[in-house]
Amino acid sequence: MAEFVIPPVDVVGLPVSGSSGQFPVAQIYCVGRNYADHAIEMGHNPDREAPFFFLKPGYALLSGGGALSYPSMTQDLHHEVELVVALARGGENITVHEAQDLIYGFAVGIDLTRRDLQAQAKKLGRPWDAGKTFLHAAPCSELRPGSSLQSIHQAKIKLSVNGEIRQSGNLDQMIWKVPEIIARLSECFPLRGGDLIFTGTPAGVGPVQTGDELHAEIEGIGSLRVSVKQ
Ligand code: MN
């Protein structure tokens, strides 16, 4: 083992249902505009444009849910409920056919977004990082290992705020399917075991206030509770 000149950052872990072990998180990849009704609500053409990606750092993970502080620099924090895919192993130039073999399991996550900062970045042609990256910007449920893509093909995905449904959709509405996302990502980036992929959100994104209780759920996969503190 190399000796580091300062202590290295700890690997963040996700709980795994039915196991006492944790899933070690490497990169967190996210897909933009992957449901037509969400693309439309954000003012875009939902035609099958090539998928595009952004990343969140490990410290964005709010592992298993819980409390987070309302982030700095924003007056317009938004929720985006998403299917999260966890990779058991990686590779480059993975085919759509091979993609299923890379999957460790699935979870439900929320791609929290400082929408005002993202909108400003879009307007100025700048990177989205300030909109998408902050402490606990990626709450994620425990992982459910071993589910096949077939078994979740038509699963319902939803999010409520204080008991009121805000987002409700179905995984079969995804424009780019999970194997296509993995294949495309692996052309762009060196995928590794431990990577998480947030796969885009259905319509109904909206603001989150201090004091709100979020409940995200994907049928057959799991549920996630997040509370927003001062
Ligand atoms: Mn998203």
Image (spheres, grey):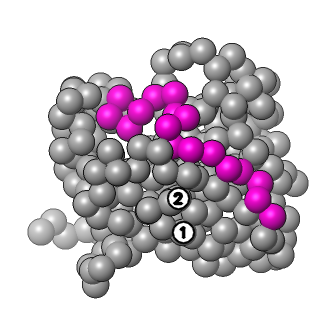
Examine the rendered structure and indicate whether residue 106 appears above or below residue 175.
below
> Whole-percent x and y of residue 18?
30, 79
Disc 1 designates what residue? 223
Residue 167 appears in the rendering: yes
Q: Secondary structure at mark 1?
A: strand
Q: Is residue 60 magenta?
A: no
**Quadrant of the image occupied by residue 42:** top right
Q: Mark 1 CB in 8 Å range of ligand 1?
A: no
Which residue sits at x=77%, y=31%? 41
Which residue sits at x=29%, y=64%? 145
Query: Horizontal placement of 64 versus 97: left or right?
Result: right
Please state, as top left, top right, bottom left or bottom right, where the N terminus lies in the image: bottom left
Q: Which residues are magenta?
A: 164-180
Q: Amino acid at mark 2?
A: Ile
Query: Horizontal placement of 140 versus 213: left or right?
Result: left
Return the disc, 1 or 2, that comes first in the chain's sequence.
2
Which residue sits at x=18%, y=44%? 101
> Whole-percent x and y of residue 70?
77, 67
Disc 2 designates what residue? 218
> Whole-percent x and y of residue 56?
51, 50
- Tell me, yes or no, whether the two marked residues, 1 and 2, touch with CB atoms within 8 Å: yes
* Closer to the camera in the image, 54 or 200: 200
Which residue sits at x=32%, y=45%? 150
